[in-house]
Amino acid sequence: MAGTAAIGRAPLRIATWNINSVRLRLPLLTDLVAALEPDVLCLQETKCPDELFPHEGVAALGFEHRLVRGMKGYNGVAILSKRPLLMRAEDPDWCGKGDCRHLGASIDAPGGPIELHNFYIPAGGDIPDREKNPKFGHKLDFVAEGTAWSAARPAKRAIMVGDLNIAPLEHDVWSHRQLLDVVSHTPVEVAALTAWQQAGGWHDALRHFVPSDQKLYTWWSYRAADWRASDRGRRLDHIWVSPDLAGALTRHAVFKDARGWTKASDHVPVMVEIAP
């Protein structure tokens, strides 16, 4: 293992992936680590209670430090790190549901600790109407709470990642016109997520590298007979950084090939490298 000083001088690579069951797809983490070499990996939809999390298999990949918050069958988030982590204890219980959709941590980094937040925002069901669909209401309430939380504590030396389940920009979806009434790209969701981003002063780290007039996707539906040929994707997975870290971004990766893996998740890993 490299010495502490060597690690301290190296750039920090942070990846995020909706793994859609950590126990089912544990073998795929080997391929992800080989391709992206992340220092920190944030997972969503681990679908695993804490006592059954596969710590041994994850540790074998070099992630000595691990924080998990999971439940049986659905939701769940985890932060896996090669650098020391400290869990944040003061973060909210979003919408009072205790449904394992957020982990906050402090991570060792050059220049001082970095605050890291891993989110899994509710998908919101199929009907974009709060009255007809309580799941959609839950999604909007969650984002509203996140907005108020960020407004009260503007981001500083902070990174927010996760499956935010909203594609906010026109070229974050395969067809802006056809998806305007589809949950994840409706105007009310886009406005809500944009308000959250602005409230904290967050900088969109993926769009830092890929201009907003270029298509950028991280999710392709299981329903597509040939997902690569149709390429009807959406950018649901995001990495935001505080303004003081925006200038330290050095590169990014959207690991599209992961969507073609056997037993793939419908999301692909994304990563940024930062020299804080």
Image (cartoon, grey):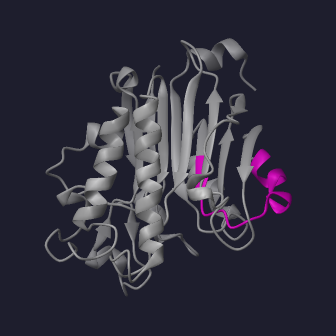
14 and 10: which is toward the camera:
14
**Up/down of 82 relative to 195, above or below:** above
Is residue 51 inside the magenta stretch? yes
The boundaries of the magenta stretch are 42-60
In-image side of 222 versus 192 (left or right)? right
**Up/down of 177 relative to 91, above or below:** below
Most extreme residue toward the front, as rendered?
A: 131
Residue 193 appears in the figure: yes
Classify the position of the N terminus by image quarter.
top right
Q: Residue at x 30, y 38 (%)?
A: 198
Residue 201 location, x and y as percent? Answer: 33, 32
112 and 23: which is toward the camera:
112
**Up/down of 51 relative to 105, above or below:** below
256 and 207: which is toward the camera:
207
Residue 121 location, x and y as percent? Answer: 49, 59
Res 250 quadrant in image: top left
Res 247 quadrant in image: top left
Q: Residue at x 71, y 16 (%)?
A: 4
**Up/down of 202 relative to 206, above or below:** above
In-image side of 161 versus 25 (left or right)? left
Q: Residue at x 31, y 69 (%)?
A: 233
Residue 101 location, x and y as percent? Answer: 59, 56
Q: Residue at x 40, y 44 (%)?
A: 147
Is residue 74 inside the magenta stretch? no
User: How many numbered marks are there?
Assistant: 0
